[in-house]
Image (tube, helix red, strand yellow):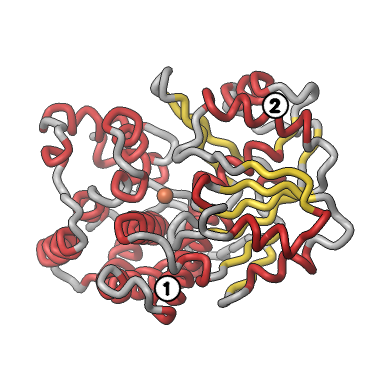
Amino acid sequence: MISRFFNPVDTRFGWGSLDQLASLTEHQRVALVTFPEARALGLVDRIQALLGERLVHVIEDVQPNPDVAHLRRTYEQFWQQAGECDTVIAVGGGSAIDTAKALIVGTERGSFDELLALLASGKAFLPARCKRLIAAPTTAGTGSEVTPWATIWDTEQQKKYSLHLDCTWPSVALIDPELMVTVPMGVTVSTGLDALSHALEAIWNHNANPISDTFAVSAIEDILECLPKLQHNLDSRELRSRMALAALKAGMAFSNTKTALAHSISYEMTLRHGLPHGIACSFTLPLVLGLAWGQDAERDRILQRVFGSDLNQAQAWLRTFLHSLSVKTEFADYGVSAEQAQTLLNDAIKGARGQNFIGSASALR
Ligand SMILES: [Fe+2]
């Protein structure tokens, strides 16, 4: 059996690595995509100082879970006002990076509805034009800086679109833990749990292989050890760095496997119940662990390296871990009845990400 791992992102990790933006953008015109608080944190000024006149356009009103209603205006303004730029720099969490991925994909006329129609077709397409993307995450969790995927939401229509093209792989990922030191506790926990979910989803996945497993297991070990400590010591450079690296490893793992059932469940929990992504994709991890266990001897072996050989103990341990981070682990805790949860689970298994899950066939039997 030949395993293959592919990731084309030029990945740079380390304290202060954001400064490399200057050398990475020489002789280019640059647009910055970032979150509303970035200016108050001094980030916009810092990037302006690094780039000088190269910085020709700034978008700083990125919303959590980029929604078509807001993205339409941003997209069309971007292509009207910054269509000549060479590179887009995304500085922020998953929402900023996903927004930037949508922006860099240029349609024939620069209209957002053209892009939406292409996404709605569900087929791969060749964009009329595409910008270079540099991604610098400010949270330890998303992994979007080393994957080609972006999620675009349509809350009014209660659906989501998945963007994935060859050109939506970032050219460069700058993982600078210094950008993460000001992240408050709630976001630190939810994004850290997103990374945990990415790593576990990469293991209970039809697309897993020994290379993705290596990244995933290492990420899980780090997150289980670091995240509980970090929530009580948010200023720790060491813990911020370790979580940043763990989230990167989880990102590398699922960049080759995609996500699975826990994420498929999460989309509905975010759309209908407004849960932040990191909570929506992690509160079911003990449940999904139980559904994965016993499906495949090789996958069991990897899971047991992390959790030991007793499923009940493993699930109980994972629940306790989540509770220690103030995350509730039952559907009922989020106002979802047992009957609704079963329907949601069945639908999630049938979804594209659900079909990556190793237990999908037996769960539907
Ligand atoms: Fe995620």
Counting from the top left corner in percent of width and height, residue 88 is at 71, 48
**For residue 48, what is the image quadrant?**
bottom right
The residue under the point 51% across, 60% down is 138
**For residue 237, what is the image quadrant?**
bottom left
From the viewer's perspective, is residue 45 above or below residue 158? below
Q: Residues within 10 Å of mark 1 (few under 14, many from 20)?
A: many
Q: Amino acid at mark 2?
A: Glu
Q: Nearer the viewer, residue 108 or 303?
A: 108
The residue under the point 29% across, 48% down is 279
The residue under the point 30% across, 56% down is 186
Q: Quadrant of the C terminus?
A: top left
State the CA–CA distance, disc 1 to disc 2.
36 Å
Tell me the residue that label 1 is attached to: 240
Of mark 1 and mark 2, the one earlier in the sequence is 2
Q: Residues within 10 Å of mark 2 (few under 14, many from 20)?
A: some
Counting from the top left corner in percent of width and height, residue 94 is at 50, 49
Q: Is residue 305 visible?
A: no
Q: Nearer the viewer, residue 35 or 126?
A: 35
Q: Secondary structure at mark 1?
A: helix
Q: Secondary structure at mark 2?
A: helix
**For residue 340, what is the image quadrant?**
top left
Counting from the top left corner in percent of width and height, residue 49 is at 72, 63
Tell me the residue that label 2 is attached to: 76
The residue under the point 57% across, 60% down is 42
Q: Amino acid at mark 1?
A: Arg
Q: Nearer the viewer, residue 42 or 173?
A: 42
